[in-house]
Image (cartoon, helix red, strand yellow):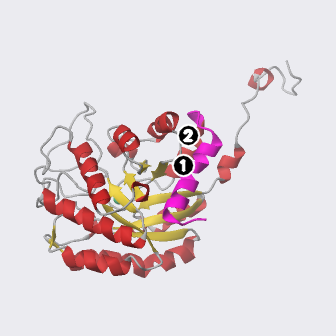
Amino acid sequence: MDQTPTERPTDAAYDEGAPSLPRELLNTPWIDGHNHAHTLSWSDRERYALSGCAAMVAVASGYHWTPYKPVRASDVRYLWDDAINRRAAIERNHFFEVGLGLGVHTGVRVEDPDPLFEKLDEYAAAEEVVAIGETGVTPTQHVEPWDLDEQRAAVRAQAAVAARHDLPVILHTPNRAGDDGGRSYRPGLGTPGYEKTPGLEGPSVIDEGNPALAATRMDVEETRAAGLPDERVVASHADPNNTSYLMAETDCYLSFTIGHSWLIGVDAADVADAIDEYGPDRIMVDTDCANVLRTDPFAVKRAVLELYRYGIEPDAIRRVVYENPRDVFGIGG
Ligand SMILES: [Zn+2]
């Protein structure tokens, strides 16, 4: 028993001491490769800065922010221009690097989208654009279904832009809806934590048992058809439903979205499982933080510590939260 100055033995007298703690993790830089931080509050963006975010990809593609339905090409361009307009001011306030992801989300049908893909080619040449997307086949749309072939064509057209500019594509790989067996909410109120008008979701345009995985397979077929190498494809949101397919049959990166685990059920434990099974070389984490969702700007920082607790070594953690997104998006170096 150690000598202690306490009156009688406390835990300190018996404690063998913690295993050596990797204090470098407190200062490991990290990059959020998929968020909508330009829609958040100033204080949320400050949380990114205070917790060690070196860089992020702010994704300006998303139907939550286009007010009119049907959506027109000009509505989507407004989203791109809004992000370009505000990007530098965000950097100046918070110091982290902000790259932009520009694209056309398929969560709502866009009328006559082809001119948009031509314009995207011009936007993709801009230095601040570091990714195309998020996009990717979506089984259901808000308000009005979008024909599956047209969705696939939209993904292919965007992947072709990415290929021409050697940019990565961020895929919105749908998560498989789980049934947690819990009590359901009163009809008409929607899901608390996700501000979205309920009851406007159309029927699924994918008619098979696992539409989320089918959508991911279609995305990869289209990015390949466009000539984009798998290594330039980031599948966000990776989950246990799509991980084995993406790891075994593609060379895509898998980005696990952990900023709203309460909604999609994916958290640091899933990331640790994937690292154990496949190694860290093609794995990332992102937050997908957005103003319409209950999301957590601290999610990546928290995962840095959580992955260590789950047995992942500091080198692998650094690879997943920093080096992989740095190398793929070319930011935060
Ligand atoms: Zn997103």
| Kind of residue at badge 2 | Leu
Q: Which mark is residue 266?
A: none
Q: Closest to the observer: 300 or 136?
A: 136
Q: Position of residue 123 (x, y in %)?
A: 37, 79
* Nearer to us: label 1 or label 2: 1
Q: Is residue 274 left or right of residue 135?
A: right
Q: Residue at x 39, y 49 (%)?
A: 260
Q: Is residue 87 left or right of residue 177?
A: right
Within 10 angstroms of label 1, few (less than 14), some, or many (20 or more) residues? many
**Local SS, label 2:** helix
Q: Which mark is residue 320?
A: 1
Spatial CA span between label 1 and label 2: 10 Å
Magenta stretch: includes residue 330: yes
Which portion, as a residue range, is magenta? Answer: 309-333
Q: Residue at x 59, y 71 (%)?
A: 95
Most frequent secondary structure within the magenta stretch: helix
Q: Position of residue 190 (x, y in %)?
A: 21, 50
Q: Residue at x 14, y 56 (%)?
A: 148
Q: Is residue 11 above or below residue 275?
A: above
| Quadrant of residue 184 within the rendered picture | top left
Q: Closest to the observer: 276 or 4?
A: 276
**In this rendering, does residue 63 appear at all?**
no
**Local SS, label 1:** helix
State whether label 1 is within 8 Å of ligand 1: no
The reply to whether the C-beta atoms of the residues labelled 1 and 2 are less than 8 Å apart is yes
Magenta stretch: includes residue 304: no
**In this rendering, does residue 195 appear at all?**
yes
Q: Position of residue 133 (x, y in %)?
A: 34, 64
Q: Which mark is residue 307?
A: 2
Q: Is residue 54 above or below residue 180?
A: below
Question: Quick one: label 1 or label 2, which is nearer the N terminus?
Answer: 2
